[in-house]
Image: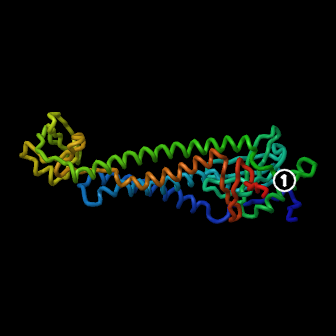
Amino acid sequence: MLVDLDQDTPRTYVAKGNPTLELIVTLGGGILFLLLLAFMILVLFLSPATSSTSTQPGLIGGLSVIPIMLISRGIFMLRNVRHITLDRSGLTLESPLSFKQIPWNQIQRIAKKTRSNFMGQSHETLILHGPDGKEVGEIRDTIDGFAELIQQIEYRLAAASGTRVVAEEEAPLEPKKARRRGILMGSFFTVFALGMIALTVVSLNDLIHEKKYATESVATQATIVRRYMLKVTPYIEFEFTDSAGQTHRREVMMQKEAWEQLANSKTVPIEYLRSDPSWNRAAGEDRVTFDSFLPMGIIGFLLFGAGAVFSFMGFDLNNKGGKFQLTRWGQPFKRTSQPA
């Protein structure tokens, strides 16, 4: 057993690899990616329409997953303990967000438990319990020399208390807690699944109406009510009367060249759908459609919907030591065989 018999000699343990660089790359990369997407959205609304305009919103929506995951992962990493010091008085846990000193007499017992991180990977974790049984700290196996660190804590706790201390193996997640966790995760997935349904409906509605222009569009001249510039974006407001005698009015963004050509015009060519005149478009309009979101909406609904179903049923997938394990309500899932 690797133990330090001299309690007066402090021992220091640090995280494996280069956690500072990893945090900068993860969190900083996510923020930079988010700023890039914000710039793409700004360009989308300010630039004239092009042949790729209809696919750009879908591209932005798909790419938005990347910064969300990176930033979420970076925020999780801020809580990771990176530096641990053991000395005669106790131990010190340091992370980018906290600095905690725990005297040896404030640790009643220690236990080893498997806990999952943000990305679903499991880590062996040493849980420190206080005199009231509550958790006062945790140390993951991301610390270099984790096994030796546990031995050092066991020895120094025993020396401080006068009794033998051994890290216990905590039982897997209790079914009651596992059910609460499953309901929480299921609710989380359900919210996103509903969002994907709404996105799919909007995209499908856009796609259906866009295709109708090829078979039932009606061309007419609309009266320009107002022609103006909002900061750097050109707009016009027009009004027209459909074949049923109903009047419709819209404000739309315009391509700059088309907008300039309307400087001395009182009308603008438009087309509308005979079955639904509220769907109309002006010549030179800078349109942003959402029909390209349809594949992402369907895929997102299937993924988040499946996640919600499996979470409410109590299933979870853990990765420990590179091996995946299916659990249900916190317990390893075992298939029951039916007798022949």
Q: Mark 1 = which residue?
A: 167
Q: Nearer the viewer, residue 304 or 161?
A: 304
Residue 250 percent across, percent down from the top left: 21, 39
What quarter of the picture does the C terminus occupy?
Answer: bottom right
Residue in the picture at 76% in, 53% down: 113
Residue in the picture at 20% in, 43% down: 274
- Residue that protrudes farthest toward the left in the picture: 264
Q: Nearer the viewer, residue 49 or 160?
A: 49
- Residue that protrudes farthest toward the front in the picture: 340
Label 1 residue SS: loop
Residue in the picture at 15% in, 54% down: 257
Work out whether residue 220 can be spotted: yes
**Residue density around tag 1, few if under 14, some if 14–19, many if 20 or more, within 10 Å:** some
Residue 35 percent across, percent down from the top left: 41, 54
Is residue 302 rendered to the left or right of residue 5?
Answer: left
Residue in the picture at 65% in, 46% down: 313
> Colour scheme in the image?
rainbow
Q: Nearer the viewer, residue 193 or 91?
A: 193
Q: Nearer the viewer, residue 213 or 1?
A: 213
Quadrant of the image occupied by residue 324? bottom right
**Amino acid type for the residue under numbered disc 1:** Ala
Residue 224 percent across, percent down from the top left: 12, 40
Is residue 287 rendered to the left or right of residue 327?
Answer: left
Residue 332 percent across, percent down from the top left: 74, 54
Is residue 247 rendered to the left or right of residue 302?
Answer: left
What quarter of the picture does the N terminus occupy?
Answer: bottom right
Work out whether residue 142 can be spotted: no
Quadrant of the image occupied by residue 227? top left
